[in-house]
């Protein structure tokens, strides 16, 4: 097997594979560092630029539905709770989730996975219908053929969510790469330049104040720990080598074991918070331990008009042997 051109985020649990300390049966991956990794998402779904690539889970589901020939293995490089990812302008008057109805909220693109999770938890737990919020974006959708709902609009050329939130022209926005933690399209340096709102008289505040108790309660009730970063492979490679998906999964599992990191180190690397009980793996691989999160994400994608047709958890993964790892 020839070397596979690959890119994914380098965490403690993926480093050994990126650096070649763990290899596939045919040899090491041809690892290509990509920053920000979001740039690779777009390159993969538009150009099939890699053989193996990390993708945002929602981007993957939409790309599959649009006919992009990629297929996933159940390796999820990151999981993250989102109750702390909504910032409100100081003069917005927003105090509870229901106050978002009829307001304008910034998100980098409507299909951003963080946005899908945030809209899902707002709907499920607080009755906030995403269709009753005006969503404002400042970047393209990765899947270029996707047309967002009518309550989604783009900023004017040259403007950004950072500008709009700072000036009070939107009421709230998501944080990090999903919102006001960057400016512009995914390109080198976008997170190291002007990253976040400029100083204002009163800084934006978190909608939920202290989110950790809400995250613990949500996980306890639902079993859903939001997934981010799924590993995909070009579908023709799996057709040509039916063992490839199993071998990739085993290699990522071996890299995780090679990290030798304890739970605390993994939690710190993932910024995972304390919602997951101490006796649970914070980053499990496999279908079964991620099934509830996958089912929730698929449901949210359907409810938010990102997917037109139902899809099952089983059909989104390549055939393979995936013991929990």
Image (cartoon, rainbow, N blue to C red):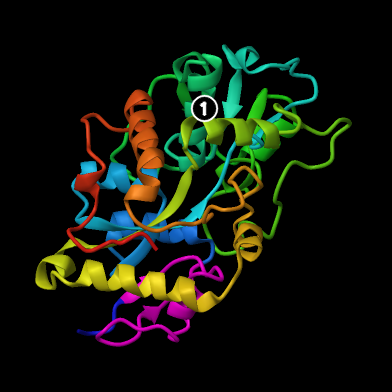
Instruction: Read off the magenta span.
Output: 5-34
Q: Quadrant of the N terminus?
A: bottom left
Specify whether residue 17 is painted magenta: yes
57 is higher (above) or lower (below) than 206: below
Q: Quadrant of residue 98?
A: top right
* In-front residue for pair 158/50: 50
User: As drawn, is 107 to the left or to the right of 249?
Assistant: right
The secondary structure type at the circle numbered 1 is helix
Give the labeled residue for mark 1. 121
* In-front residue for pair 144/267: 267
Q: Position of residue 84 (x, y in %)?
A: 66, 36
Residue that sits furthest to the left in the current view:
240
Residue located at (33% from left, 76% from top): 5
Residue located at (48% from left, 68% from top): 34
Local packing at callout 1 (Cα closer than 10 Å; few below 14, some 14-19, many 20+) is some
Q: How many marks?
A: 1
66 is higher (above) or lower (below) than 123: below
Specify whether residue 286 is painted magenta: no
Residue that sits furthest to the right in the current view:
201
User: As drawn, is 44 to the left or to the right of 9?
Assistant: left
Residue located at (36% from left, 64% from top): 53
68 is higher (above) or lower (below) than 26: above
Q: Position of residue 173 (x, y in %)?
A: 63, 32
Viewer can see residue 106: yes
Viewer can see residue 50: no
Q: Position of residue 52 (x, y in %)?
A: 32, 68
User: As drawn, is 146 to the left or to the right of 141?
Assistant: left
Q: Quadrant of the C terminus?
A: bottom left
Q: From the image, give the main secondary structure of the stretch colored magenta.
A: loop
């Amino acid at each position: 097997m020839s070397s596979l051109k690959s890119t994914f985020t380098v965490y403690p649990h993926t480093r050994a594979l990126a650096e070649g300390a763990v290899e596939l049966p045919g040899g090491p991956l041809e690892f290509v560092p990509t920053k920000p990794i979001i740039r690779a998402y777009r390159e993969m779904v538009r150009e099939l630029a890699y053989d193996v690539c990390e993708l945002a889970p929602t981007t993957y589901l939409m790309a599959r539905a649009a006919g992009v020939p990629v297929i996933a293995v159940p390796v999820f490089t990151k999981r993250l709770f989102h109750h702390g990812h909504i910032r409100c302008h100081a003069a917005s008057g927003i105090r509870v989730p229901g106050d978002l109805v009829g307001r304008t909220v910034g998100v980098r693109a409507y299909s951003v996975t963080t946005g899908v999770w945030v809209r899902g938890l707002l709907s499920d737990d607080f009755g906030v219908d995403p269709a009753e919020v005006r969503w404002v974006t400042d970047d393209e959708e990765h899947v270029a053929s996707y047309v967002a709902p009518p309550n989604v609009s783009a900023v004017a050329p040259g403007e950004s969510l950072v500008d709009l939130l700072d000036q009070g022209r939107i009421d709230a926005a998501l944080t990090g790469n999903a919102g006001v933690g960057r400016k512009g399209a995914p390109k080198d340096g976008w997170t190291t330049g002007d990253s976040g709102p400029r100083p204002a008289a009163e800084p934006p505040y978190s909608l939920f104040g202290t989110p950790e108790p809400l995250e613990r309660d949500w996980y306890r009730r639902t079993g859903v720990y939001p997934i981010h970063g799924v590993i995909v492979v070009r579908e023709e490679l799996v057709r040509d080598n039916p063992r490839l998906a199993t071998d990739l999964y085993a290699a990522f599992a071996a890299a995780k074991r090679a990290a030798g990191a304890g739970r605390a180190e993994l939690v710190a690397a993932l910024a995972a918070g304390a919602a997951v009980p101490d006796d649970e793996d914070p980053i499990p691989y496999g279908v079964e331990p991620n099934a509830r999160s996958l089912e929730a994400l698929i449901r949210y994608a359907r409810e938010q008009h990102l997917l037109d047709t139902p899809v099952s958890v089983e059909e989104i993964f390549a055939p393979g042997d995936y013991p929990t790892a």
